[in-house]
Image (spheres, grey):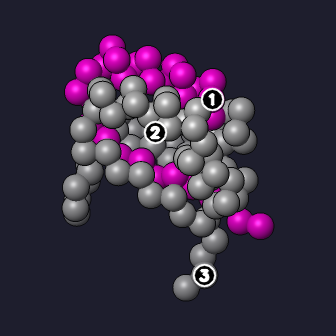
Amino acid sequence: MSKGYWIVTTTVTNPEGFGEYVRGFSSWISSVGGKVAAKDLEAKTVEGKGGHLSVIIEFPSKEIALEAYERPDYQELSKLRWANSIDTSITIMDGSVTH
């Protein structure tokens, strides 16, 4: 089974409030089998809309990545992200190369 990933970009508008989200997310992510694989606070989007913060989060599978996103506890936690950032994009993808 291949890994699953969240590819996240966002622009933080309130660092203090967003820090509260990050603290909650950091403890939550390991409880659902995920881990932060990469993070860049000064990412450069060269095509399309993106934010200054980019994060890649790895899960055991795409299915687990989708289930994690849909969990009520994450949806509640994500309210902090929405309140303290703009232009957020989250893509959930399979880690295998099939094409």
Q: Earlier in the sequence, mark 2 or mark 3?
A: 2
Secondary structure beneath dot 3 equals loop
Q: Name the residue under label 3.
A: 98
Residue 22 relative to residue 80: left or right: right
Q: Name the residue under label 2.
A: 39
- Give the answer, above or below, for where 85 lies relative to 7: above
User: Is residue 43 in view from this perspective?
Assistant: no
Q: Which amino acid does label 2 sit on?
A: Lys
User: Which region is colored magenta?
Assistant: 1-29
Q: Mark 1 points at which residue?
A: 28
Report how many numbered discs are placed on residues in the image. Answer: 3
- Give the answer, above or below, for where 48 lies relative to 77: below
Query: Quarter of the image containing the C terminus?
Result: bottom right
Secondary structure beneath dot 2 equals strand
Q: Which amino acid does label 3 sit on?
A: Thr
For the residue carrying disc 1, how many other residues have a C-alpha within 10 Å: few (<14), some (14-19), or many (20+)?
some
- Give the answer, above or below, for where 45 lies relative to 54: below
Q: Residue 85 magenta-drawn?
A: no
Mark 1 or mark 3: which is in front?
Answer: 1
Q: Which of 86 and 76 is in front in this view?
A: 76
Q: What residue type is labelled 1?
A: Trp
CA gap between label 1 and label 3 equals 30 Å
Q: Do the residues labelled 2 and 3 touch (CB within 8 Å)?
A: no
Residue at image point 45% right, 24% down: 21
Q: Which residue lies furthest to the right in this view?
A: 1
Q: Earlier in the sequence, mark 2 or mark 1?
A: 1
Please identify the quarter of the rendering in which residue 84 is found.
Answer: top left
Residue 86 relative to residue 96: left or right: left
Q: Residue 28 magenta-drawn?
A: yes
